[in-house]
Image (tube, helix red, strand yellow):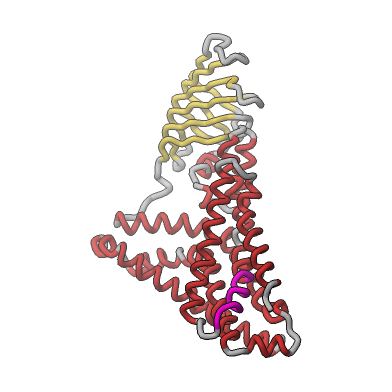
Amino acid sequence: MRILDRYILKSIVGLFVTCLFTFLLLYVIIDIFSHLEDILKNRVGIMLLAQYYLSYLPIIFVQVTPIACLLSVIYTFGKLNRDNEIIAMRASGLSILQISKTALILGIMLSALVFLANDRLVPSALSSNEKLKQEIESGSKKNTAAETINNLSMYGLKNRLFFINRFSPATNTMEGITILEQDEHQNLTQKIVANRAAYKDGLWRFYQTVSYEFDENGQIKQEPQYMQEEIMAIPETPRDFLSQRQRPEYMDIEQLQSYLWRLSKSGASGIIKNLKVDLYQRYTAPLTVFIIMLLGIPFSLRMKKRATGLSSIGLSLMVGFLYYVLNAIGIALGKAGILFPLAAVSISHIAAFGFAVYLIAKLP
């Protein structure tokens, strides 16, 4: 690595780490003061608080890395511009791409790191954080194993819709079950109502069931059939029912893809469309780090010589705000069905990348 590259890299990395620690410290201080009453009233221990804020680390890292990178790049190149070092580099025959190569490589590496953290760490961190937050606010530990889930709905395989009044993961039992079976055109073909169900030896046993058969016009074909006990060939396990309680942000990419595949068998087009936007966003969101660093380079080189410190912060906030607004608009259009899911999550990145390349090409 050239001396010049090490010089630029040292400045960017130093500022990036400083920004990360600053944002983290500010977040912890603000959050502690907002929950200070609950902490004192419930006498929350230091270990519990440490676990709570440690669970925030992956979340904060993913959220603030783009802004920290933008601020670091704008300040570093703005300072080089102010000290006439950019002019000296250009006079020696270096192009803008050669000068900023180290920063862009760092941006690619941080994008990959954000992708891994967002997929592997953030979903479990969000789940743990939510449980720890409830424990801090309530003052008692929540027993998730003995928890009963009320009003659970699920899209299953073979075009089945499940509606369950009560589901107990500890005993693998369900109460108040309604199962709707549909054909490939989403026409109702069968309705099963059961009082209770239990999962044992890999099979679901339903008790006090009433089955209704429907024709293509949605009319009941024959008298309902009643059975005191019935074993049904349902491939879903209690773990599948429990996983459907998770929100998409609590799932990693593999779980989201599995959930989408399950939903595709049921034809829930509206939910599938929204989940596809969430899934594609997992792939495209980390690109923000690289693109926003690329976008910061021409802005920093166009700053006036005396405007480095506060101007870099102001420019970072402005550029980051506009970028995120465009991204939010694209996602909203995708979930509304106006744009295709992939186009919805990509439009802000494509626009920002094209704008950055245009600004760099216009530099003297």
Which corner quadrant holds the C terminus? bottom right
From this view, report whether residue 254 is shown above or below residue 11: above
From this view, report whether residue 218 is shown above or below residue 289: above
Residue 40 is left or right of residue 126, and the answer is left
Magenta-drawn stretch contains 114 = no
Q: Residue at x 44, y 25 (%)?
A: 195
From this view, report whether residue 59 is shown above or below residue 71: above
Q: Is residue 73 visible?
A: no
What kind of secondary structure does the magenta stretch mostly adopt? helix
Residue 26 is left or right of residue 162, and the answer is left
**Which residue is nearer to you in this view: 15 or 151?**
15
Q: Residue furthest right?
A: 93
Snapshot quadrant of residue 3 = bottom right
**Which residue is nearer to you in this view: 339 or 279?**
339
Which corner quadrant holds the N terminus? bottom right
Say how many tags the image has.
0
**Which residue is nearer to you in this view: 282 or 322?**
322
Q: Residue at x 64, y 54 (%)?
A: 346
Residue 86 image position (x, y, % from top left): 65, 86
Q: Which residues are magenta?
A: 294-304
Q: Residue furthest top?
A: 222
Residue 46 image position (x, y, % from top left): 34, 69
Residue 5 image position (x, y, % from top left): 67, 85
Q: Residue at x 60, y 63 (%)?
A: 288
**Which residue is nearer to you in this view: 247 or 280?**
280
Residue 152 is left or right of residue 276, and the answer is left
Residue 293 is left or right of residue 205, and the answer is right
From this view, report whether residue 234 is shown above or below residue 81: above
Magenta-drawn stretch contains 298 = yes
Q: Is residue 143 visible?
A: yes
Residue 79 image position (x, y, % from top left): 56, 85
